[in-house]
Amino acid sequence: MGREDSHYRPERVDGRGSAGSGPGGATGRVSVPGANVPHRPAPATGSARVGPPHHGSGPASGSARVGPPHEPTAALNRPGAPDPIPVSPPVPPAGAAPPVPSGPPPARPRRRMRLVAALASVLVLALAVAGLAVLRPGPVAGWLGDDDSTGTAVAAPPEPSPQAVLAGPDGNAPLPTGAGIRSALDPLVRAAALGDRVHVSVADVSTGQALYGSGQDTPTVPASVTKLATGVAVLAARGPAYRIPTRAVAGANPGEVVLVGGGDPTLAVDKNGFYPGAARLDDLAAQVRDALGGTAPTKVIVDSSLFSGPVFEPGWDADIPTGGFGAAITALMTDGARKNAAEARRTAEQTNHAAERVPQPDLTAGRQFAKLLGLTGGAAQVSRGTAPAASGATGTAPGAELGTVESLPMIRLVDIMISDSDNVIAEAMARQVALAKGKPGSFVGGAAATDQVLGELGLPAGEISLADGSGLSRTNRISPSLLTDLITLAGNGSHPELAAIFGGLPVGGWSGTLDERYRAAATSAGAGVVRAKTGTLSGVNAIAGTVTTADGRLLTFAVLTDRTQGSLDETRAALDRITSALAGCGCR
């Protein structure tokens, strides 16, 4: 049996309920850029800021690397070129669109994105000259954002050059017909294991043309597929290079240090943190000691006021706070609120990333920081408070900054969120969207801001209603066609900053939540060519991503079902047969 999504539970099979309005701010159907409309939305607001180099260091040398599952890397192979260089994330190539077959598609007409001509010509030329190959996974931790602040060079045995295992899609491959896809999928969509609410959308990535639909515009419980919407929204709002700061400032009294959370869920205590390359509190403590000079630290105050509202979403099942896959969402935490980061690393694969979480992540982080500053006994006890206003303060005056560390860049955080289905990172990303759009850093603010950003991107915001950013809430609703619109927008080259969502997508039969799927004879066609985010709650199963057809055409698909009837294995096998059918046919 393949690995379960990190929020599957075998109780309370339901998934029902109306798709009533959630806390989102955008309503109605919104025009899609480039889809025969007279306008294009303004570029997404938000920062693409690159902060100063973060002060964290890479994983401890000599230790076994444990972290997000490795994903395939992409390389451009030219005659006489050196060994392929890994890049993150692999971006689905955009090719010139072949003539569209005559006759209407089976689904009702929808607005779809078309490739931006100038960018398409550049990409097609580059790919025609170089060729694209998907390679065996290499070290993810070294791709972006890692350094070794210790300055110690550790010799490591050279890794062999990655071996090409899958040819890239062909932008000039023939486009499947609606009738061909209907013939292939209709019998599979009616599988008993999927239940009586199976909603499907299939589209072409290059042209955006809808190729198949069955309930495609119906908002459906998405489970963890929600993270695709969260990832696109945060990349649009913050930019792939943005890093989340954690600061220390001088308190109101001499020796007081205020630890100010910026919302980085991956912050580590030291080199033994859960997330490789994360910012570290021990580095921040060293900066504080230098900034204080002869003044000894006397007290640590925790400022986690950047996030507001409840720390658990009201629509979460009762076992989520204690089940190891969710946590109290606070603006300050270490290691995703895991109680024992080292143990969580060792057992990540066996437990599917479940781990005991601390009940008050911000206070736990404050106590860890106080210990690093040398405080003991009563002085090591921390309290919540608010940092003094800076007002241009310098030195050790109240409000003066004593140090800052910064998270991995947003592109890496989105990779980890999607590949590991990390619910805590997802909730932190949703709050980053809220903060970028001037909304409260809360569940409600994150959901409303995500709706807003997707509407600004031209996506049909009337087909999404969110309560959280992770998909743990059963009150979330997303339509399959919004998901295929979203994936098309990220993959057609019109918004290059959004392509980062592809780097973390699990690969069929290879990685992440798809690592043990697509291995049966009936689904083997999807191995290596299906890249998708899965979603699982009791009674809810979903999958959305991309697939390359037998002819080399890149398609996007979304299949959501929230009243499943079969066992988990039976339901997943039924979903895999649908996507494998797309991989195995030309469908013309």
Image (tube, rainbow, N blue to C red):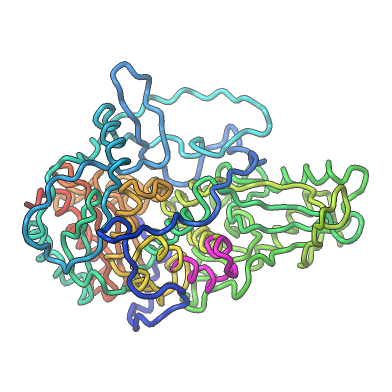
Q: Which residues are magenta?
A: 433-451
Compared to 133, does 221 lie above or below? below
> Where residue 160 appears, x then y in whole percent?
39, 24
Magenta stretch, main secondary structure, is helix
Instruction: Find residue 508 and report its horizontal and vertical position in percent.
Output: 28, 49
Total marks in image: 0
Q: Point out the residue furthest to the front here.
A: 38
- The image position of residue 560, as x and y in percent, is 27, 67
Can residue 2 be seen here? The reply is: no
Residue in the foreground of this view, choosing between 31 and 312 = 31
Is there any visible trace of residue 464 in the rendered image?
yes
Tell me what residue is drawn at x 49 percent, y 23 percent: 157
Place residue 510 in its image quadrant: top left
Q: Nearer the viewer, residue 152 or 567?
A: 152
Q: Is residue 246 above or below residue 469?
A: above
Q: Quadrant of residue 162?
A: top left
Residue 143 percent location from the top left of the image: 48, 36
Q: Residue lying farthest top?
A: 80
Residue 554 within the segment the image draws in magenta: no
Choose top left, top right, bottom left or bottom right for residue 76. Answer: top left
Q: In percent of the image, x 33 and y 54: which residue is there? A: 489
